[in-house]
Image (spheres, helix red, strand yellow):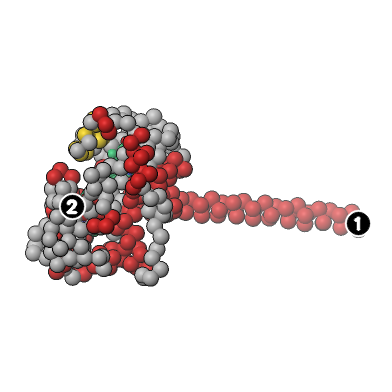
Amino acid sequence: MTIVGGALKALVCSFGRFWLIIMLVAIGAAGTWRSGLTAQASIERGEYIFHVAGCLTCHSTEGAPPLAGGHRFDTPFGVFISPNITPDKSHGIGAWSEQDFMRALRYGLAPDGRHYYPVFPYTSYTRMSEQDMRDLFAYLRTTEPAARPNETHELVWFARSRLGNRVWKALFLDPGAYQPDGRRSERWNRGAYIAEALAHCGECHSPRGVLGAVDGARHLSGNPQGLGGDVIPNITPHASADVSSWVAVDYAAYLSYGEMPDGDYAGGMMATVIDEGLSKLTETDRAALIEYLMTLRPLPMKGARP
Ligand code: HEC
Ligand code: HEC
């Protein structure tokens, strides 16, 4: 009896162990499957951020693979040339850690401690949430690596030292993620986040001071001397601004396919901003952005009569 009992017990035990192992394997597989799903979701969210934040245009140029850099920016300080941000290990950012990437966006700092020039709009990207930065990095890692070497900026002598950027950042960079305004709705705050942290409307639509920093006191009131010398329109609801007569559906048409109330279409840089970015906003996000824009403090354009 005891022999049979012992054998039975051993059988039950090994049978139990068998099921235990099966269960553990199943849990493990489900876990991997789930983390595979979360990784995929992160990449998809990252792709969305990538478009709304407008990384593509600045980091691409005709005749070169996307994101391999080479875009030239003519400024009063000389020509800046964007770097390769593909996952290529030697020419792009393929050897970067997620931490390196977040430091670049939050603090304008390279992995080797160099201070970036603010043509790379990290003064806006610093407002991104940590999660959005992680997702963006996850997406960038899935893009096609390109072995295109970086070019050196062609700058006037006094702008060549990156130490100047350090001083500039001490004056004008206020690092940190967007802090919601508790007096406003969640939707308004989402709109503010899209405009300020991601789509960096102010980099073009706000005037700049002598040192090239965006003038926060004249937020989105237009730039009389925009990139390339163009006047960039005032997008606050001030009586002197065209948008002051726009209603929500006018904004919606413009920000999704560029059509203005008079039937004309957005041109130049704004056409690109819409095509590459704003047209891809979800309905909810676009509505949030519109709510934010329509409640901006009305300001006249710099130099214009109040
Ligand atoms: C307005 C143009 C512009 C936009 C928009 C822009 N960048 Fe850049 N970026 C630059 C320039 C120019 C530099 C080089 C800065 C320097 O040399 O100091 C740069 C530098 C970088 C670097 C550092 C690369 C290196 O090799 O050190 C990274 C990473 C980067 N950008 C990622 C992004 C991401 C991600 C986005 C979108 C969220 C983005 N950039 C949007 C112009 C832009
Ligand atoms: C890279 C520069 C740039 C960025 C970034 C940018 N804009 Fe513009 N925007 C322009 C230019 C240039 C025009 C004028 C377009 C034209 O001449 O058709 C314009 C026009 C507009 C207009 C039409 C105003 C009018 O009076 O005709 C609106 C509204 C607008 N932008 C909203 C935005 C919003 C909102 C954002 C951010 C989500 C944004 N823009 C980001 C450059 C930019």
Number of numbered labels in the structure image: 2
Residue that label 2 marks: 223
Q: CA distance from mark 2 to mark 1?
A: 93 Å
Mark 2 or mark 1, whichever is nearer to me: 2
Secondary structure of the residue carrying tag 2 is loop
Residue 134 in percent (x, y) is at 43, 49
In the picture, the quarter occupied by the C terminus is: bottom left
What amino acid is at disc 1?
Answer: Thr
Residue at the (23%, 54%) spot, across then down? 206
Residue 141 in percent (x, y) is at 40, 42
Q: Quadrant of residue 289?
A: bottom left
Q: Earlier in the sequence, mark 2 or mark 1?
A: 1
Indicate whether 254 appears above or below 268.
below
Q: Residues within 10 Å of mark 2 (few under 14, many from 20)?
A: many
Q: Nearer the viewer, residue 234 or 270?
A: 234
Q: Residues within 10 Å of mark 1 (few under 14, many from 20)?
A: few
Q: Which mark is residue 2?
A: 1
Q: Which image quarter has ligand 1?
A: top left
What amino acid is at disc 2?
Answer: Asn
Residue 270 in percent (x, y) is at 18, 52
Residue at the (17%, 61%) spot, across then down? 300
Residue 121 in percent (x, y) is at 31, 46
Residue at the (13%, 64%) spot, across then down? 240
Indicate whether 29 appears above or below 294.
above
